[in-house]
Image (cartoon, helix red, strand yellow):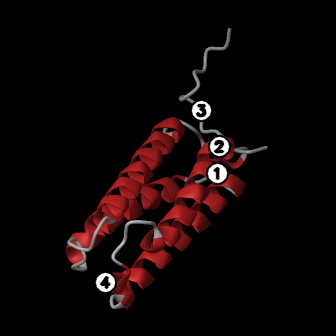
Amino acid sequence: MSDSGFLNTHRTWEDWCGMLLGALIVASPWFPMQDQAAITGNHTMVLNTVAIGLVVFGISQLEYVALQRWQEVTTILIGLWLIGSPYVMGYSGDGFLRIYHTGLGAVLVLLGILQLWQDWDMTDQDMLKHGQ
């Protein structure tokens, strides 16, 4: 029996989940049950959401190729920004987008915390072996 548990090791499926989250974040302004008129008039919110999604997708791809701790910390910070974006940018009353961004941001923060916890004791050389 192996001494390392399922959640004790950073696995590549976590990086794929990060990429999926990035794609979902990019698409979130156009999810069902949105007030499309409010979204059409708020270009800053759409640009913010697309930028966040692309950054999450890119960082997850970097984690898959060359894992480093700064990527996980950045994932947590971006998740926190996604949670706060509806309130900072003034679209917290626009339909379900606040709920989508809060939920996706929370999942992103949890994924980043899990990955950071898994990699906390790893050396830089061990982290470079990730995915091989």
Q: Which residue is mark 3?
A: 9
In three-dimensional space, the C-alpha distance between marks 2 and 4, rounded to whole angstroms, equals 36 Å
Amino acid type indicated by mark 1:
Trp
Q: Which residue is mark 1?
A: 16
Asked whether disc 4 touches disc 3, contact meaning CB atoms under 8 Å apart, the reply is no
Of marks 2 and 4, which one's residue comes earlier in the chain? 2
Amino acid type indicated by mark 2:
Trp
Q: Position of residue 91 (x, y in %)?
A: 25, 77
Of marks 1 and 3, which one's residue comes earlier in the chain? 3
Q: Who's the residue at 33% across and 76% down the image?
A: 35
In the drawing, what numbered circle is on residue 13? 2
The residue carrying pointer 3 sits among few (fewer than 14), some (14 to 19) or many (20 or more) residues within 10 Å by Cα, namely some
Give left or right: position of 10 versus 72: right
Asked whether disc 2 touches disc 1, contact meaning CB atoms under 8 Å apart, the reply is yes
Instruction: Give the residue furthest to the right.
Output: 132
> Which dot, 1 or 3, sits closer to the camera?
1
Q: Position of residue 34 (x, y in %)?
A: 37, 71
In three-dimensional space, the C-alpha distance between marks 1 and 4, rounded to whole angstroms, equals 32 Å
Q: Quadrant of residue 12?
A: top right
Give left or right: position of 127 versus 110: right
Q: Quadrant of the N terminus?
A: top right
